[in-house]
Image (cartoon, coloured by chain):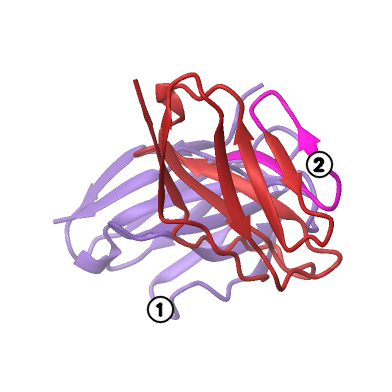
Amino acid sequence: NAGVMQNPRHLVRRRGQEARLRCSPMKGHSHVYWYRQLPEEGLKFMVYLQKENIIDESGMPKERFSAEFPKEGPSILRIQQVVRGDSAAYFCASSEGTGSNQPQHFGDGTRLSIL
Amino acid sequence: DAKTTQPPSMDCAEGRAANLPCNHSTISGNEYVYWYRQIHSQGPQYIIHGLKNNETNEMASLIITEDRKSSTLILPHATLRDTAVYYCISPSYNTDKLIFGTGTRLQVFP
């Protein structure tokens, strides 16, 4: 029973390039969440998506960041024109349903390093 | 989200029970208490959650006080691999985002 799969595990980009992070939820899960963890800090919520819909993007930076969860395929977190401050661990979580009685299960993250 | 308060760090001897407390005095009647842990460089791992009754699974037990203002996560026989940061979280009923505080850094020693 595969868990949440994220790839790549490590991603290195130069300033100004684009970063694409992928997340495949657990089997049977249709709700995906992205969190960011800056060095020596706690996880911060970024965005919550269901298939083809963004439900809550209150934690997303206003510029350069976007997320999608298409009908087919993984969820993608896209960062355009990366800057040094984007260096962080990005975690994806998924849940079977919505509501406060639905635990989120996390992947092992993508560590993004900006040169 | 209900504000949760946890001690910043705890130690536990290997093989002994680790009891991690959490205060959530402003919790509402329909808000659950969740526990996650994060072992260094890994993603957060779901441990257990509960509403009113005590809960137990293969990883841990969750004891919630009758007034629901506090809870305790119990790892019955701690091992070195249980060394991690443990987060107590109580999401608001009408939200799906988890708000991670600073947690409790549990160090299990031989």
Decide if residue A6 is on the left or right side of residue B74. left
Label 2 crowd (10 A; few <14 / some 14-19 / many >=20): some
Task: Name the residue rendered at 82%, 53% in the picture.
Answer: B51
Give the letter of the chain under mark 1.
Answer: A
**Quarter of the image that includes the N terminus of chain B:** bottom right
- Mark closer to the observer (2, 1): 2
Decide if residue B60 is on the left or right side of residue A66. right
Decide if residue B102 is on the left or right side of residue B34. left
Magenta stretch: give its range.
B46-60
Amino acid carrying mark 2 in the image:
Asn
Task: Name the residue rendered at 32%, 46% in the picture.
Answer: A111
Residue placed under numbered mark 1 in the picture: A63
Give the letter of the chain under mark 2.
Answer: B
Indicate the quadrant where residue B57 lies.
Answer: top right
Q: SS of the residue at dot 1?
A: loop
Task: Name the residue rendered at 80%, 58% in the picture.
Answer: A99
The residues tagged by marks 2 and 1 sit, at their Cα atoms, a distance apart of 44 Å
Residue placed under numbered mark 2 in the picture: B54
Label 1 crowd (10 A; few <14 / some 14-19 / many >=20): few
Amino acid carrying mark 1 in the image:
Glu
The letter of the purple chain is A
Q: Is residue B65 above or below residue B37?
A: below
Decide if residue B12 is on the left or right side of residue B59. left
The letter of the red chain is B
| Residue B44 appearing in the image | no
Q: Is residue B80 above or below residue A61?
A: above
The one nearer the camera, B61 or A13, is: B61
**Quarter of the image that includes the C terminus of chain B:** top left
